[in-house]
Amino acid sequence: MEINPAVTFKHDRSVMYAKRPKVLIVGAGLAGLTMGMLLHKADIPFEIYERAPEVKPLGSAMYFSATTAPMFKQCGIYDEFVSVSKPVSGMKICNEERQLEYTIPFHGHKELFGTEGYIVARPKLYDILLRQIPQKHLHLGKKVLSMGQGGNGVLLRFSDGTEAEGDILVGADGAYSAVRQGLYEKLKNEKRLPAGDGLPLPFSTVSLVGQTRPLTTEEFPDIELPDCQFRTAVGANRPYAWKTFTTAQRTVCFIVTQFLDTESSKDNDAFRNSEWGPEAAQAMCEQVRDFPVISGSAQGVTMGDIIDWTPKDSISKVMLEEKVFDTWFDCRTVLIGDACHKFNPSGGVGAANAMHDAIVLANLINGLPFHPISEEVEDAFRAYKKERIDWVEKAYSSSAMFRTMAGPTMAAKMVRYAMKHIPAWAMRKVELRVLSNRPSVAYLPPQEDKGSVRPFFQPSLSAMAPVEEEKTRVGSGGEGGGEC
């Protein structure tokens, strides 16, 4: 199949059978799996293509608040999610003397927003999502070499010589998205790419992430506490901060962040395009072994102990890029998650925002007519970005603030001082702005939201799936295939 924008055809729905658009998803991370799960629930045909030859259980802990609870409940995974998670009542800021400086509390969330927040190990959540996808729709070892799109569909070519055809292409393949790169190359050649979208991804931090084996109370006494012990330690005279999280599996997840100066940025630049993996992590492990960790024990646990308790293939080094791209879609191709907005994980909102992208986009794809032409598809993508962009920009600013707060600069010290002394009413105002965004899936039965603060208005909830009679309707542009 060749995608030729010049090819058009008489688009007469009166003589067509009811056909939903076929969606090709590139990337089997949290964003791609969530997108696939939601399309599966809508009976919309989809396939997921992942470049990695096998699923690797990498990553640390993730925070999920009330903002994803409605979707988890609608998809029937909320109870299992809670069972593998630990509730978290706040983030504890500590110093190198293993002393608590102050706590940023997460109080009252269940009453206000319907549920409390939870910490979950990334591999556990990934496993839940993976089991929602029929395995026949997941294709591993599929590295995208090229992509094409036009009025009559989309086409992917893979390094193994195979091809895939569809009606919509979703790039959910992360910060160095092959779909985004292919799309942007086309737009650049056509002089339609904003200048800022062509610049490299900026990054100022690098992190070591991982998860220990299950620990005993002798090794880490706080592992027994019912709430997640979420602690952030800030280096006194070194450009590092480190976080630890106790999990429901009796493990400790960790993130050690190095704040880069210009020279160290150059040193780390070679890792920018590499996969997450243990090979790049060993040198950083040696650099951080003496960092003190609070464990609930009188004995001095260090990051060295945490690293020694962690399987080597569960440790990885990652670049923490930060950018919100201006171009999220064109014609039949659209980006979600890190492919279009990459946050620093300090704010703990990257995964939730990727899932919010998937919810809104799935709602709007489900609302497309049978045999949608490219203009109708692009209108849906435009509505998707319009609904999401303000929330994404707020999340980006919040993540940048939390990243600054953990740093070694004077600005960081000022932010930490402000957070330590922030009035409760001011903190509540921030929470109201963030946690009132609780998007739902338009085509699944709504779940009762017991929060006293109602969710913000969600435009995509009004999107309705086509019905059989709609196949006789000829939409705008109905005389052609819709050129891109």
Image (cartoon, rainbow, N blue to C red):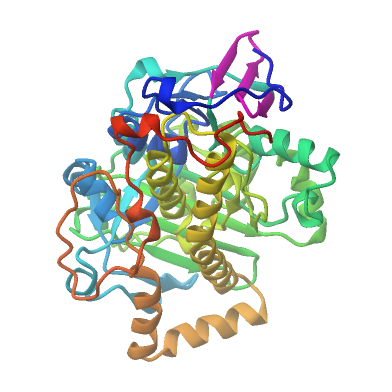
Task: Tell which of 155 and 220 is nearer to you.
Answer: 155
The picture places residue 122, in percent across and down from the top left corner, at 38, 42
Q: Where does the image place residue 307, in percent across and percent down from the top left?
A: 47, 43
Residue 240: percent from left, percent from top = 60, 62
Where the C terminus falls, by quadrant?
top right
Q: Is residue 302 visible?
A: yes
Residue plotted at (26% across, 47% down): 72
Which residue: 76% across, 62% down? 261
The tally of labels here is 0
Q: Is residue 483 left or right of residue 37?
A: right
Residues shaded magenta: 147-166
Q: Residue at x 85, y 38 (%)?
A: 189
Main SS type for the magenta part? strand
At 55% across and 34% down in the image, what residue appears?
Answer: 478
Residue 475 in the image: above or below residue 223: above
Q: Camera-side residue: 417 or 172? A: 172
